[in-house]
Image (spheres, helix red, strand yellow):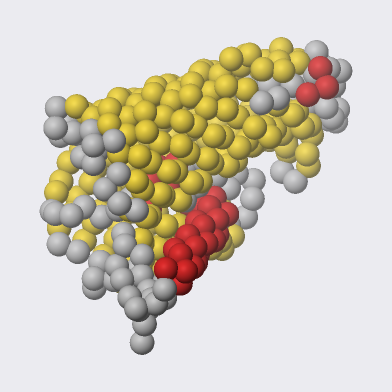
Amino acid sequence: MTPPFVLPRARCRRQVALRDVGRAAAICLCAAFAAAGGDAFGADGDDAEADDAATSPPAAKDMFFFSPVVSGEWRPETAYAGGRGRVASATAAGEFSMFLKRGGHTLYAETAWRRTDWHFEIVAAGVTTAAGALPDYTQRAGALVHYEWQYSPRWGVVAMLTGNGATGDGARFGDALSGAVGVGMRYNLPKEWVRGLTFFSGVMLASRIQTSPDWLPFAALNWKIDKHWSLRTGAGLTLTHDFFGDESLRVSLAGAWHNSRFLLRSDTTGGTGVGVAGAAGAKRDRVLQTKEALLTLSVTKEFLKRFGYIRAGVGGSFFGKHKFRSHSERLETLRVHPHAVLTLEGGIRF
């Protein structure tokens, strides 16, 4: 039986062209499906480390290393829609990861911390009346463990456990915990079909701040197209070009949807909250939810035989929203105009 996308050599050039079109269409559909389901990799939607671990290609040989990484992000002052004010932010982050591969077993573990300092200038009524409603900073700390067992040339098992806390302005970290546990399968397509393509799919139980745990499907793919090009999905879609084929210099175009929640300090005075006057003396937890579509172009330079790397990126944020909630009650929504995002990252391996 002839595998999909493969035609006998004796057929005409028109059939070969149709084969290539069919292959490209199938890959695009799979990538779109995987990107749509990618949010499931992070319990709070923006856990890119889970995405990276879940869809990274397996190492070709046994290896073991540690990797500390530091990064920063800067967003210039940007207006809210309707003339309701402006916002700017600066972010610092650090992570420490471990990678181990022995035979068909791969283990990846990571702990990470991220802090964003905000500068709000709100002029709309209903927001400025909320004393202390807008945070000066938000932070997230968490850990991830990802395991794979490649028990045959084509099939493997995937398991993941992640947990984090996200707070703002001194809210209790223990009240802002969320996480996920997931299991799934990975499948390496036969090279006669499409060379270098691996699918991941499964299900996870995930919780978020002020929500009950829920079962979610996840799907992703990793496609090593050739020596120079690769495509990866998870919490988004990343297309990478390796200039020399040795990963020493790469340029990537990435698109992702971010959806994060941060627990803020409780309201304890009348009239606080954002846009909604609470009962005098009432206490309620508030949550800042940030949503955006992010498109980034980055360049990565490896040095000293992959001992370390530095990455610089420039991108744009689109369809951004800052929502303030109290459990199921939406207190206020501020729409963020499109703006630039600048990133810088560096790390070593040892």
Residue 70: percent from left, percent from top? 34, 25
Left of 22 or right of it: where is 106? left
Q: Residue at x 48, y 46 (%)?
A: 237
Is residue 174 depicted above or below 230 in this figure? above
Q: Residue at x 31, y 71 (%)?
A: 192
* Residue 32 lies in quadrant: bottom right
Q: Of residues 15 and 115, which is closer to you in this image?
A: 15
Residue 80: percent from left, percent from top? 74, 21
Q: Residue at x 25, y 66 (%)?
A: 150
Query: Where, quadrant-wise, is the N terminus in this rendering?
Result: bottom left
* Residue 337 lies in quadrant: top right
Q: Of residues 330 and 293, which is closer to you in this image?
A: 293
Q: Residue furthest bottom?
A: 1
Q: Of residues 15 and 262, which is closer to you in this image?
A: 15
Left of 257 or right of it: where is 73? left
Residue 193: percent from left, percent from top? 36, 70
Residue 154: percent from left, percent from top? 29, 71
* Residue 125 lies in quadrant: top right
Is residue 128 depicted above or below 219 in this figure? above
Left of 20 or right of it: where is 125? right
Is residue 14 depicted above or below 111 in this figure? below
Q: Residue at x 57, y 22 (%)?
A: 340
Total number of numbered labels? Answer: 0
Say whether residue 253 is visible: yes
Say whether residue 347 is visible: no
Query: Where, quadrant-wise, is the C terminus in this rendering?
Result: top left
